[in-house]
Amino acid sequence: MMLIILIAVPLAGGILAGILGRRNAGAARWISLAALLLDLILALVWLLPVATRPLAPTAGPWLVELRLPWISTLGISFHLAADGLSVVLILLTLLLGLAAVACSWSEIHERTGFFFFNLMWVLAGILGVFTALDLFLFYFFWELMMVPMFFLIILWGHENRVYAAIKFFLFTQIAGLLMLAAIIGLYFIHGQISGNYSFDYSALLGTPLAAGTGMFLMLGFFAAFAVKLPAFPVHVWLPDAHTEAPTAGSVVLAGLLLKTGAYGLLRFVVPLFPEAARAFAPWAMALAVAGIIYGAVLAFSQTDLKRLVAYTSVSHMGFVMLAVFAWNEMALQGALIQIICHGLSTGALFVIVGMLQERMHTRDLRRMGGLWKEVPRLGGFAMFFALASLGLPGLGNFVGEFLILIGVFPQAPLLTVVAAGGLVAASIYSLWIVQQAFHGQARETWRISDLNGREAVTLGVLAAALLWLGLYPQPVIQMARPALAHMRQIQVPHSFPAPESTASLPAAPADPQGEMHAIR
Amino acid sequence: MIQLLWLIPALPLAGFVILALGGARLSRRAAAWIGVGSVGISALLTLALAVAFLRGLPAIPAHIRQVWTWFDVAGLNIGVSFYLDALALTMMAVITGVGFLIHLYSVGYMAHDDGFSRFFAYMNLFVGAMLILVMADNLMLLYLGWEGVGACSYLLIGFWYRDPANGYAARKAFVVTRVGDTAMAVALFLLFDRLGSLQIQELMQRAGAQWGVGTILPTVVALLLLGGAVGKSAQLPLQTWLPDAMAGPTPVSALIHAATMVTAGFYLIARTHLIFELSPLAMSIVAIVGAATLLLAGFSGLCQTDIKRVLAYSTVSQIGYMFLALGVGAWAAATFHFMIHAFFKALLFLAAGAVIHALSGEQDLFKMGGLRRELPLVYLVFLAGAASLSAIPLVTAGFYSKDMIIWEVFASNRGGTLLWAAALAGALLTSIYTFRMFFLCFEGPLRTPVAHKPGWNMSLPLAVLAVLSLVAGFLEIPHSFGGGVQIFSHFIQSALPATQLLPARESNEILCQLASAAAALGGLGLVWWLMLRSPQAGAALTRQPLAMKLSRFWLNGWGFDWLYGLLFERPYIFLAQINRADIVDGCFTLLARFGLALNALAGAAQTGRVRTYAAGLTVGAAAIIAWVVWL
């Protein structure tokens, strides 16, 4: 029940904000803020104690689970569940949701109620994606988070918003349809083999698939998640969408929507299709590394600050994909930390860009420069998040990237070395941001105000979280450990012999109970 | 006492946090107290700790104190834990002691700067990061300090951010060293993959047990670590950032060159010496890198016109000596030279800062001169520093440390006559460029009027460092001087092995010392003769076409900047620029265009004129009939 309430609170808050916001913009803001705060408190009170409690070794993977019959004739149920991984992502969603509300406070003046309605519904959709365990329901939430996002971009975006919104919609929708096709394909194959037609994740796990079919279905899922991630070369919707979206839209996009892609790879692609994923791993890892380098180089050449930050996402999320396809504990833990820290640091950078845009009405780096003198506190925060983004040890991103690289290294040493080159490229673009915007001579005369209290708190919380994850990530690691271990125990069924494992994925540790876990 | 180990880095870090959060709200007085005080207390604690540590010797050569678990994933258990042995203690003493003097000096030097509290915040962070680097008991934590030091150097080199050139120098320092850091990171991956730990002592043990001498793995690891070391320590081929790092305020240079940052590379190799000893090839490369760098930088130092750039090249060259010593296994000599170098290099930078301060920011040596009478204290301390840098025999500390290196390079079983000759030539060069700078600065006519004289907070550190630059050498006096004194090497040998000397060469010690003394004095004499005794001869020499060409080449650091610009910097920028619009996006746009073009084509067919449709129908029908009939 907890999970339903967690999703329902932002849904209801969004409706309320939408209705009251027609008369009173302030009410919409306060309702959204209150709803998310309430949700965060509920999540902390309900989920955190469960997630931090030591698990009995025989317990199943799910900390909380809810299964209600829905469309029984088609084998569709309303199945929500959360493990440590989901809990971490739920908390991240709510925290960044609060940041998104805070940064829209004075930015959005038109149709405020409808804006917050959309924002809250995106967040609810994301919460659903992170907890849905029925593939039909998952697809429902997947679409639920996309449509309001489309409206956020097309209604409150910047100059080129229509183009960006349609591009965003086309890319994610086409890829989403591929996933839908793959879901239906898997549903029928599983039904034919077992006689039990079901969309349920736990039932579909371990479906024996011929190599070709498995690869085909896996690619369907992969397409949807790779576009969302975004992976090279289907990242091209992202710079436009990020650049044109309102600040809250960019924060949610970078901080959360991209994470649903990573989550999908973790939760669905590899567990549902272990063999296909293993065969595909070298390609996926190569794409990931290409994205790391490509995104970093492109980020450096951008003159639109928001576009620059957008390209850094391509680079950072490449690390996550690299880790997912290495599929060992070290890399996966790194991926989770990277997911969180990228959300926080890139989200914060977008907030900063939004603050600059609100004050200067431009995002053009060529017109900035020397702003430190005007806004030292904002400059200090920008420096902090730029350093986080380039992976300075002591801040969370470093822990994520380092664990990923050290985890991937034994499986793909050469790719790891190339990916490590991304660290150099990251320092080039990160320091370039600070140089172009805050250091150097002022290229134009700006009289702008430094951070106010609300803004300082928003950035301060994000900075503190990054520092905490950089110096003491152990609680998160601990929380995710059982979930990741369960996912890694999911075994290939014995009806199909495993291919000669020459690829870079070693088999999960031999565990006679693996299948049991998978089926449960 | 050892329990308080964590306080030593924590205090400067706390200072940083207070200064960063307090920002401009703190008064200058408060900022100065916090900034200087935190490092000062750290220095006192280090002193107290040293006493406790020495009491424990030789029974307990090392202490480990874990503060908390940083993370623990899949067998990689990394603690925020500190390791104290003789090597770490030496480094800590220098970092906090010299660091404190530099901080104190900065109160005077930066007194009128807008970013006063920001400056001390960064300086405290710098000291804190460097302390973590040298105290870390695992390579991961060491890497944290390592990158932290790099970030601080970036922040401080670009401290005067309004000049884009400073920003460029700062970014250059960070990016160039990060290239090295990345190599080091790969070394960490490899070490963990093969040996299953990143805890330094454990690694050394396992490496010794599992890897044979001269096998490929220790060589690869050692060379990757060396990559990190040459980046931070500004050795070939990553030395290019250091001369430009002069863009920061002068106390920053003193801190970077003496107490922090550039000595990190030396420390890393000394700390992981067991891995290097497993690879004779890597050791030789370390020695060759050191020898080549010390010569290269020496020649460049000859031609600089900026007083700080002369000093910068002298640092590159002196660190070259340390690398040379490391490469021949002269661990104690390298550490000793590190310590003495910290004293005289901090002294020289701070004294140069006093000169620059006095001349209202003038750094050009050819606009200085005649300052002997104007700034007598600075003159005296600068002389002490210059003499120590040039290793003037017997009376300076630099002689004892540099001579120890030169001698052991000659006599060590890993050394050789060629390396020794390079070291000796380097000593001659050092003496020449040092006294050229000294005479240009203090002799001759007064060229720029003196505006400020240094106050007590600038003079006191100068005096202390001058004394140290002269007398600290007596901690280690060679055997050939009636048995000598070996306090330092006995102390350091609880952490680092003794040098293996070739018995056949041991009898030549006194000859070797005479040679290095002659090199130092010869250089001094030569400069004196060319610049003061008969300046015409000196002027004639510099007018030679060959000399002018060489001088321009050396002035620009042997063209490395030009080369790297051509090979890396410009291609990278070019690639980024031509692809600014993202070629992949272009492909998708093309797809969309293709769709639009089809649409236009189909749309054009829909004219609404019956004649066109009828014509289309006829042609189509004819084509189909033709197809059916003939095929």
Image (cartoon, coloured by chain):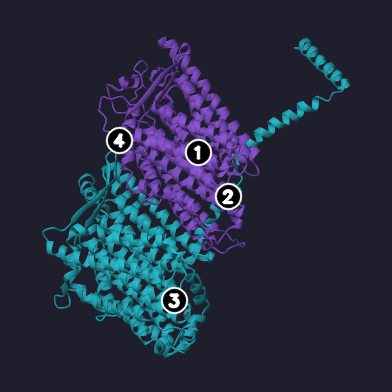
Chain colours: A purple, B cyan
Q: Secondary structure at mark 2?
A: loop
Viewer-closest of B134 and B328: B134
Query: Which secondary structure, mark 1?
Result: helix
**Seen in the image, is A76 located left or right of residue B417?**
right
Q: Residue furthest right?
A: B611
Q: Residue at x 42, y 63 (%)?
A: B23
The type of residue carrying mark 3 is Ile
Mark 4 belongs to chain: A
Secondary structure at numbered mark 3: helix
Chain to which the residue tagged by mark 1 belongs: A
Q: Give how far apart the Cα atoms at labels 3 and 2 are.
A: 38 Å
Query: Please, what is the three-letter code of the amino acid marked with disc 4?
Result: Thr
Residue shown at the point (62%, 61%) measured from the top left: A444
Residue labelled with disc 4 = A52
Disc 1 and disc 4: Cα gap in Å? 28 Å
Q: Nearer the viewer, mark 3 or mark 4?
A: 4
Of tags 1 and 4, which is closer to the observer? 1
Whether labels 3 and 1 share one chain? no
Q: Chain of mark 3?
A: B
User: According to the image, label 1 marks what residue?
Assistant: A32
* Left or right, A458 with reference to A444: left
Figure label count? 4
Q: In this rendered view, identify the residue nearer to me: B78 or B212.
A: B78
The residue to which callout 2 is attached is A302
Do tag 3 and tag 2 residues touch (Cβ < 8 Å)?
A: no
The residue closer to the viewer here, B245 or A228, is A228
Secondary structure at numbered mark 4: helix
